Amino acid sequence: MTARRKPQRGVTLVELILSMVIIGIALVGIFSVINLTVSHSADPLVQHQALAIAESYLEEILPQNYAGGASGNRADFDDVDDYNGLSDHGARDQHGAAVNGLEQYSVTVSVAAPVALAGGVKAKQITVSVSGPGGSLSLVGYRADY
């Protein structure tokens, strides 16, 4: 009489360990992609904030007079040359008061010597540089003497 083999029911220990290893490797790959995505999800917001700071400084500077006398207090700045060399640690408003929540940004302003444009019009290049947690950027504007 020959012994009859019963059909296998379940999995062996080797099959179980192998499937756990494969699932583990897949989960590590998925979680590393999620971690990378989440860790950089705020970058566009930080970069947009730096751009908004640079734009606000340029919007403050460009309407000022082309030339004028020296001013010591930022609230008294009345021409673009007054902003040359301005360096703020933390974004500030047009009166020099710190803006809450933007302390991690640094802003520097430089005003270049006038250059002659077509038609004999002179213009000054104004560069606003903002550095912060997302890196740094520079925005350039021109104030013409017209």
Image (cartoon, helix red, strand yellow):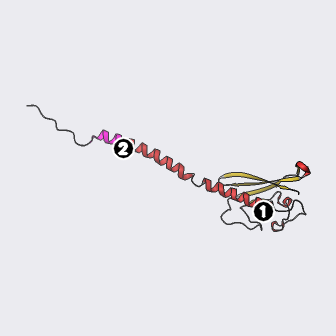
Which residue is at 68% across, 56% downward? 50
Q: Main secondary structure of the magenta part?
A: helix
Considering depth in this image, is 72 or 58 the residue closer to the camera? 58
The reply, left or right, for residue 67 in relation to residue 62 is right
In the image: residue 52, left or right of residue 78: left
Q: Is residue 111 magenta?
A: no
Sequence order check, earlier mark of 2 and 1: 2
Is residue 17 a member of the stretch shown in magenta?
Answer: yes
Q: Which residue is mark 2?
A: 20
Q: Residue at x 51, y 50 (%)?
A: 35
Left or right side of 48 for 83: right
The residue located at (86%, 59%) in the rendering is 81
> Dot 1 corresponds to which residue?
60
Q: Which residues are magenta?
A: 10-21
Residue count near mark 1 (Cα–Cα under 10 Å), binned few <14, some 14–19, many ≥20:
some
Residue type, mark 1 in image: Glu
Residue farthest top in this picture = 1
The image quadrant that residue 146 belongs to is bottom right
